[in-house]
Image (spheres, rainbow, N blue to C red):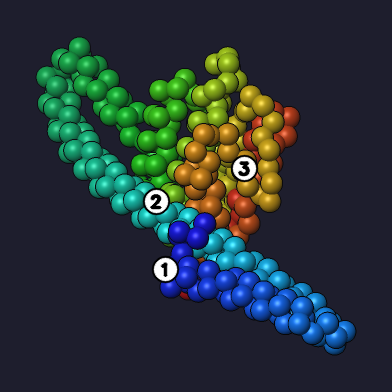
Amino acid sequence: MLNELNCRWYFSFLIYPSITLVVLIQNYYLILNDEQMVYVRWFVLSSVLLVLSNVVIFLILGEMHRLQMDKLKIELAEQRLAAQEQHYAEMTERNKEIKKHIHDTKNLLLVLQSYVMQGKIHDAETHLKEMLDNLDSGTMDYTGNIVLDTVLGAKINEAQKHAVKIVPAIALYGQLNIKVLDLALLLGNALDNAIEATSKINGETKKKIYLTVKLHQDILHIVVKNPVMHPVQIENNSVKTNKENAEMHGFGIPNMQTIVQKYKGTLDLRCVDQFFVLNIVLENEEELR
């Protein structure tokens, strides 16, 4: 614990107990030479005060260590948030390019279809129509927002690799004032946790994640519900991780809590009837400064 503190503080805390020990020994020899009750009482009182002051010093030391570890966790969480923002920004740019190519290809196919229709080549027309239908089905417009669609599309594809199905129910009515990247990070972290837990469930019919996102007037409501093999232990609205390196995991929920606080929102975790439920409520306004 001490080796994580600044060297100056390290030696300062070591000097104080040493001085205390010297003073106690000196007082002890003084009362050996003069056994008056006044000196005995003074020795006892001073000894108690010195011991208590040492206890206070080490309590302060422990608190400094705790604050330092909290600062480290916050820094790590901020680094991960920055990395995730960059990742989602890159994904969004790639998705824009893909949609641009799809749009251009669709226009070309429409022109070809027109020529074919004029030539009355029925088989070619049918084939082109199928290609257009496939292009339409390939676009992922879950929310109408390209950033959120990119995140949801990526998570749905990731879930499919684990034989997990994400069932989205999204209704965004009105203007979304919340920063889109913040919302993308919320959904990304929430779905990552849900996919990890659901992938461990036996039986494909049970491997479903239910995602609800609703924007109504000034409130955005997000619910992520996924099955779990065993009841999840929740303490102080945080999940007790079962991973080997507990200190380096579990940043997902602190990241979400940081974002929720920006918008005067609430984040609630519950485990009911073998389902883990994440419930987030945000005010639909720009983040507080």
Residue hosting label 2:
80
In the picture as drawn, the residue positioned furthest to the right comes out as 37
Residue hosting label 1:
7
Vertical relation: 272 (above or below) 53: above
Q: Nearer the viewer, mark 1 or mark 3?
A: 1
Q: Amino acid at mark 2?
A: Arg
Residue 36 lies in quadrant:
bottom right
Residue 77 is marked as none
Q: Amino acid at mark 3?
A: Val
Q: Amino acid at mark 1?
A: Cys
Regarding mark 3 in the picture, which secondary structure is present there? strand
Q: Callout 3 environment at 10 Å: few (<14), some (14 to 19), or many (20+)?
A: some
Q: Nearer the viewer, residue 36 or 78?
A: 36
As measured in the structure, the alpha-carbon distance from the residue carrying label 1 to the one carrying label 3 is: 36 Å
Residue 239 is marked as 3
Q: Nearer the viewer, mark 1 or mark 2?
A: 1
Q: Residue at x 58, y 34 (%)?
A: 242
- Kindly check if marks 1 and 3 are in contact, taking CB atoms under 8 A apart as contact: no
Q: Callout 2 environment at 10 Å: few (<14), some (14 to 19), or many (20+)?
A: some
Q: Position of residue 52 (x, y in %)?
A: 72, 72
Q: On the rendered structure, is 8 left or right of 228?
A: left
Is residue 134 at least partly visible in the picture?
yes
Regarding mark 1 in the picture, which secondary structure is present there? helix
Q: Nearer the viewer, residue 51 or 165?
A: 51
Q: Residue at x 31, y 47 (%)?
A: 87
Labels 3 and 2: the sequence-earlier one: 2
